[in-house]
Amino acid sequence: MFQLNSGIMKNSSKIRFTLIVLAALITPLMAFTLRGGDSFEIYIGKTLAVQQFLHMDKTVKTVDLSAAAPAEELRVSFNHCGQTGTNRKLALKDNQQILKEWKFADIKPGGSPVMTLSVKEIAAVQKNLKGKNLSLFYSSDLMKDGKVLATLTSRAAQASAR
């Protein structure tokens, strides 16, 4: 009888030890959120127009600039797995053709990663396209092939094309 209890106690200790080791290995993994990966935000003025986590959603969203005043700004921030790229560029494209491109300085420690475009400049490019939609395209040293962030539309530009 004593040997039976001793065997159970040894197995119980092994199980307890295994559970402690597993918990120690799994706990650091719990520190990571499911959001991770590349993400970006697009604001029109102070209003959030798009927030997207690219590992979860790869669809291209549409941002309508119709209600934006010409003096407003389109503010974009792109996050590469917690990093801000260098040699950052935003471009307006019609299919693969670059119509206008902006280059942004590398951010300094404590600086803002936000890239700002004038809605007035975007509207001027849209007007020349006679109502076609534009793609807002991002690239950097961390994303050399780039990524279409959103389709930019404006009912005003579309109406002037008719």
Image (spheres, rainbow, N blue to C red):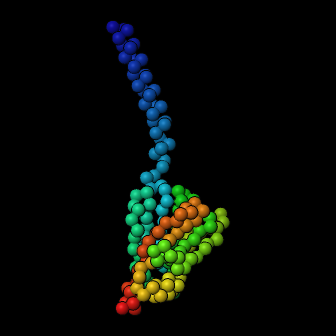
Q: Residue at x 46, y 88 (%)?
A: 127
Residue 64 vertical placement versus 35 (above, below): below
Residue 158 point in image, percent of width and height: 38, 86
Q: Is residue 43 visible?
A: no
Residue 8 point in image, percent of width and height: 37, 17
Residue 124 point in image, percent of width and height: 50, 87
Q: Residue 65 sits in which quadrant? A: bottom left
Residue 13 vertical placement versus 29 (above, below): above
Q: Which residue is drawn at 43% across and 67% down?
A: 51
- Closer to the camera, 98 or 157? 98
Q: Residue at x 45, y 26 (%)?
A: 17
Q: Is residue 52 visible?
A: yes
Of the 4 image quadrants, the one containing the N terminus is top left
Residue 97 placement, left or right of 105: left
Residue 71 placement, left or right of 13: right
- Closer to the camera, 24 or 69? 69
- Closer to the camera, 36 or 20? 36
Residue 58 point in image, percent of width and height: 41, 62
